[in-house]
Image (spheres, helix red, strand yellow):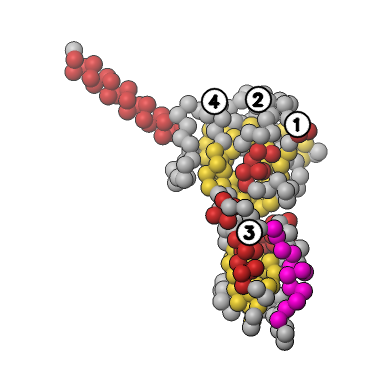
Amino acid sequence: MAAKLLKGLLAALLLSVVAACASGPRAGGGGGIPVVTDPAPIVSGTMRPYQIRGRWYRPQEQPNYDETGLASWYGDQFHGRPTATGERFDMNALTAAHKTLPLPGLVEVTNLANGRRVVLRVNDRGPFVDGRIIDLSRGAADALDLRRAGVGEVRVRYLGRAPRLGGGTVLQQAEAQRSPAPEPVPYARAAATPPPGFTPPPATAPSPAVSGGVWVQAGIWSDPREARRVADHLGGSATVDVAGPGAYRVLVGPWPDPDAAERSRRAVVSRGYPEATTVSGA
């Protein structure tokens, strides 16, 4: 009898472990991504095709969803209103809206301009604006440092079903963001007094120190410390490159194609560098 009881307990334990693995985020996330052992069921009606402004959207399970695009955010106007799942929208919570992912679900969102990374609970539909792939709550936009810019380029990965409550987590902040960030120095002001005799290289000139792909040039500075501060402010993949005698440019990238580089350029412009342009690596 004792042997049968022990065997039954072991079988139950094994089943609970398998269930936890199956319901959690997909493998490989790491970095503090929560493991969901009690997933909420998909909310009835949220997987039906629907039409907004003449366009049809067809929600579906998308286990390999991994997209790069623009994120926007929403806040006070919708605070306290019901979301597509029936949950009340809390603009300070770590939540988001997506057009076709299951509700409620979890996504990992990375701000490509600074490396900040969060897990968000997707409990609403949207954004219904061309070119935007996710709408963030105000709290999520703050965590990613996107609120001031309003729109920014992000990577969104679907992790799986959300827990019955919560699920939002701040995973990573760029080193530059853990201390007070310096004020952005616009290219036009920083480059207004170049060193005597210096002629800036053409925008399409290949970098002497950085090769491959397409880069975003935020600007050119005569002071290497200023260029370093700008690179730290942009974070993530920003680097300082010697552009000529006594001249230093800040590059972000590389990006695999011009379209990706252009999206990154717009994100750099939104962070205070209006003269940002794209350049080709050697």
Which residue, given by chain and number where applicable, does mark 1 sit on?
A: 78
Which is in the foreground here, disc 4 or disc 3? 3
Of pointers 3 and 2, the one earlier in the residue sequence: 2
| Amino acid type at mark 2 | Glu
Say which label, 1 or 2, has the lower sequence index.
1
Magenta highlight range: 183-195
User: From the image, which quarter does the C terminus lie in?
Assistant: bottom right
Residue sitting at x 71%, y 81%: 195
Amino acid found under the numbered disc labelled 3: His
Q: Secondary structure at mark 1?
A: helix
Q: Position of residue 256 (x, y in %)?
A: 59, 64
State the image coordinates of residue 196 (x, y, percent, origin top left). 72, 85
User: Residue 241: percent from the left, percent from the top?
Assistant: 60, 73
Circle 1 residues within 10 Å: few <14, some 14–19, many ≥20: some
Sequence-first tag of 3 and 1: 1
Query: Looking at the image, can residue 94 be seen?
Result: yes
| Mark 3 burial class by Cα count in 10 Å: few <14, some 14-19, many 20+ | many
Q: Is residue 17 magenta?
A: no
Please name the predominant secondary structure of the magenta segment in the image. loop
Please name the residue that numbered disc 4 is placed on: 164
- Reading the image, the residue beneath label 2 is 87
Residue sticking out furthest to the top = 1
**What label does residue 233 carry, if any?**
3
Q: Quadrant of residue 77?
A: top right
Of labels 4 and 1, the one closer to you: 1
Residue beneath the point at 68% across and 25% down: 88
Q: Give the structural element (helix, strand or loop) at label 4.
A: loop
Q: Residues within 10 Å of mark 4 (few under 14, many from 20)?
A: some
Q: Find residue 223 and report its horizontal and vertical position in percent.
A: 65, 73
Is there a contact, CB below 8 Å, between mark 1 and mark 2?
no
